[in-house]
Amino acid sequence: MEAINQFFDSVTSFFNGGDYIPWSTPDVILGCEREVAEATKEASDDQRNESIMRLSWALVHSRQPEDVQRGVAMLEASLTNTNSPLQKREKLYLLAVGYYRSGDYPRSRQLLDQCLEIAPDWRQAVSLKKTVEERITKDGVIGIGITATAVGLIAGGIAAALARKG
């Protein structure tokens, strides 16, 4: 019985995809938006950039696709103005999270590769890359299964039609 439970747990885990990336909440996003608004009025450039990074983090970690897209757009717009390798690494990583959350796994992997060129041993990026690659593999296996099923159904239909004719 234990073996059967383990089998079903592994199948469920395979199809659910077990990433361990944290989620943000609408309250966190709202707080970050207020912080950005305040920083725009009276803060230094560094403080404003830090508050924008926190908002970007909250947006790409949201469960709402429109928030994730907003975060990706903010990060892409700010990436060209980044001089520090550390800031570039952070933005590339957050972009990779955003693309992962959006389901664009190849783009996420590409950004993680760029991130790992800057910091090859960064565990967060290495871990996310592993998750992305597992997801790409899983999607490929599911796609092959769907294709094989469709081909089988078509072949079965043709065989049935030929058997009726004959």
Image: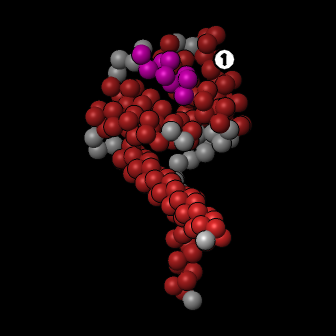
| Residue in the image at 56% along x and 72% along y | 9
| Residue in the image at 70% along x and 30% along y | 30
Query: In the depicted view, which residue is nearer to us: 156 or 86?
Result: 156
Residue 133 image offset from top left, x and y in percent: 40, 50
Left or right of residue 120: residue 39: right
Quarter that holds the N terminus: bottom right
Specify the farthest residue to the front. Answer: 166
* Quadrant of the rendered image containing residue 79: top left
Residue 7 image offset from top left, x and y in percent: 52, 77
**Magenta-colored stretch includes residue 142:** no
Whether residue 153 is visible, yes or no, is: no
* Quadrant of the rendered image containing residue 66: top right
Whether residue 103 is visible, yes or no, is: yes
Residue 146 image offset from top left, x and y in percent: 55, 58
| Residue in the image at 69% along x and 23% along y | 34
Relative to residue 5, is residue 45 depicted above or below?
A: above
Colour mode of the rendering: secondary structure
Residue 85 image offset from top left, x and y in percent: 32, 25
Magenta-colored segment: predominant secondary structure: helix
| Residue in the image at 54% along x and 17% along y | 48
Total labels: the figure holds 1
Q: Which residues are magenta?
A: 72-80
Query: In the depicted view, which residue is nearer to us: 71 or 84?
Result: 71
Relative to residue 129, is residue 146 depicted above or below?
A: below
Query: In the depicted view, which residue is nearer to us: 154 or 85?
Result: 154
Quarter that holds the C terminus: bottom right
Specify the farthest residue to the bottom. Answer: 1
Q: Which residue is mark 1?
A: 37
Amino acid, disc 1:
Ala
Relative to residue 14, is residue 69 depicted above or below?
A: above
Left or right of residue 104: residue 153: right
